[in-house]
Image (cartoon, rainbow, N blue to C red):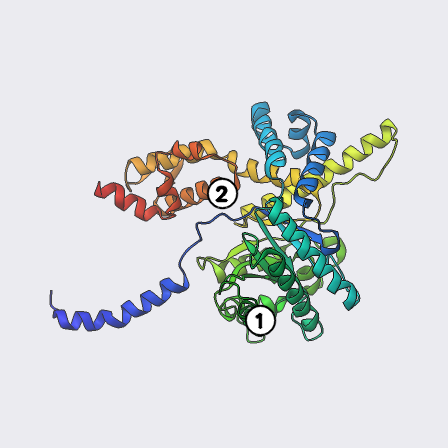
């Protein structure tokens, strides 16, 4: 080589620093479990056993409107034959029986509304007691949190006050403990100073209440056009993340506030509207590989029949048609989110749980056999190009196949045993790097 060693070291010194900084900013996707949905419920309605009661209600609705896999398959337009419909149906039933709600957000914002200070203060206290009771009785969902009011000039005092009362009451009740995977959602973020203020308040709470430093985490909401492009024509989302001082774990999309901010009329405020797709793609690009989870919003068409009480056969049929139409609409919206790489979304009612899990499981399972064959063959040939059918796999596709198995396993669509059919170990799958898998295989 022409270059002297000392000059090469000088040449690479600043590059190494820059590479290290880049890798710190973009560490890649987190390996821990991400919930596939978040259920929102008004804080005034929350009870410690809500996950159990709402799960039972979801199962009742499924059994009433899809009593078997044939009806279920037709309602969602499942392809792949009778066996496939049964496989999805059985998984959904098992999920509703075992863990119908993965993530619950106790809502003090839109789902609660503007009430007197005295009433919201009292609700903050009672919900904290209910969460403490749920912790003791182990009835809470695996992920849980609260959504406070935004830190706008008009609502900042109310948002901070509710959070202070809730956390202070909860910590006093539990002896300094918070639920597992607890998070505070900050809605309608438009400027970095809003998450920065919340992060600073977290520090104060931790110091004053004697709880572990850094334990309080937040998530933010993309609900305005200013969150996608600021006055300088720049996407501000990463600045929001930096302002959160390492406390932000997720970014959620607010479908209806965002479409309203884009002047979309009510009839067309849907999750698959092009303005939502634009926001999704910009958010994805801005935060890709930072380790921040992304979540889509909700379908607001509820699968609830119009008739109650003693029903005639005609009314029962009308209820069934209404529920099935709403299920299919929500199913298609969830599929659209998954297609866009958003693996989490919102639910607003337990009647939506069947469509949530039907969409997630069908999305992953319908391509399982093909993905196993392609990944297994690709790994066996250790980075040499492989042609399977009419699809040519390269290293980037190998990473895409690995991503499929990671997400499918995370969602519960497939089991650990089904992952092992690829010839990979669970350790290799969870390592999240196809490049490293191949390097290790070649070295061996």
Tag 1's secondary structure?
A: helix
Residue 347 versus residue 358 in the image, above or below:
below
Tag 2's secondary structure?
A: helix
* Image quarter of the N terminus: bottom left
Give the residue number, with chain letter if any, for mark 2.
410
Q: Is residue 334 left or right of residue 385?
A: right
Residue nearest the observer in this picture, 64 or 72: 64
Residue 275 horizontal/vertical position (percent): 63, 58
Q: Earlier in the sequence, mark 2 or mark 1?
A: 1
Q: Which mark is residue 201?
A: 1
* Image quarter of the C terminus: top left
Q: Are marks 2 and 1 in contact (CB under 8 Å)?
A: no
Q: Quadrant of residue 398?
A: top left
Residue 44 versus residue 1 in the image, above or below:
above
At horizontal 82% and vertical 31% (from top left) the residue drawn is 316
Q: Quadrant of residue 166?
A: bottom right
Q: Let me know if residue 46 appears in the view.
A: yes
Residue 84 horizontal/vertical position (percent): 56, 27
At horizontal 59% and vertical 45% (from top left) the residue drawn is 102
Crowd band around label 1 with a 10 angstrom C-alpha radius: few (<14), some (14–19), many (20+): some
């Amino acid at each position: 080589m022409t270059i002297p060693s000392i000059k090469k070291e000088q040449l690479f010194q600043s590059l190494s620093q820059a590479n290290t900084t880049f890798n710190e900013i973009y560490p890649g996707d987190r390996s821990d479990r991400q919930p596939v949905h978040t259920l929102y419920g008004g804080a005034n309605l929350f009870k410690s056993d809500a996950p159990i009661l709402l799960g039972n209600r979801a199962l009742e609705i499924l059994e009433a409107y899809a009593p078997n896999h044939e009806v279920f398959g037709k309602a969602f337009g499942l392809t792949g034959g009778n066996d496939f419909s049964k496989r999805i149906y059985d998984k959904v039933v098992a999920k509703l029986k075992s863990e119908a709600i993965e993530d619950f957000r106790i809502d003090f914002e839109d789902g609660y509304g503007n009430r007197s200070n005295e009433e919201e203060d009292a609700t903050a206290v009672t919900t904290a007691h209910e969460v403490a009771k749920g912790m003791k009785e182990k009835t809470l969902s695996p992920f849980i949190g609260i959504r406070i009011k935004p830190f706008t000039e008009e609502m900042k005092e109310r948002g901070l006050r509710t959070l202070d009362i809730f956390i202070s009451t909860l910590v006093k009740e539990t002896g300094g403990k918070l639920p597992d995977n607890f998070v505070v959602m900050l809605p309608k973020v438009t400027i970095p100073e809003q998450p920065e203020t919340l992060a600073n308040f977290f520090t104060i709470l931790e110091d004053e209440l004697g709880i572990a430093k850094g334990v309080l985490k937040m998530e933010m909401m993309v609900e305005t056009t200013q969150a996608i492009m600021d006055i300088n024509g720049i996407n501000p989302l990463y600045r929001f993340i930096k302002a959160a001082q390492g406390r932000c774990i997720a970014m959620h999309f607010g479908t209806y506030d965002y479409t309203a901010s884009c002047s979309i009329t009510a009839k067309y405020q849907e999750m698959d509207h092009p303005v939502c797709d634009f926001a999704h793609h910009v958010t994805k690009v801005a935060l890709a590989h930072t380790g921040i989870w992304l979540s889509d919003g909700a379908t607001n068409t509820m699968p609830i029949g119009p008739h109650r009480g003693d029903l005639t056969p005609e009314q029962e049929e009308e209820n069934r048609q209404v529920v099935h139409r709403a299920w299919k609409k929500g199913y298609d919206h969830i599929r659209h989110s998954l297609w866009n790489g958003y693996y989490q979304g919102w639910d607003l009612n337990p009647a939506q749980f069947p469509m949530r899990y039907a969409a997630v499981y069908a999305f992953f399972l319908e391509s399982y056999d093909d993905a196993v064959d392609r990944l297994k063959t690709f790994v066996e040939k250790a980075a040499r190009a492989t042609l399977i059918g009419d699809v040519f796999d390269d290293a980037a596709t190998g990473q895409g196949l690995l991503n499929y198995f990671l997400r499918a396993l995370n969602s519960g669509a497939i089991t650990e045993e089904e992952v092992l059919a690829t010839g990979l170990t669970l350790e290799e799958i969870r390592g999240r790097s196809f490049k490293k898998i191949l390097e290790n295989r070649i070295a061996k």
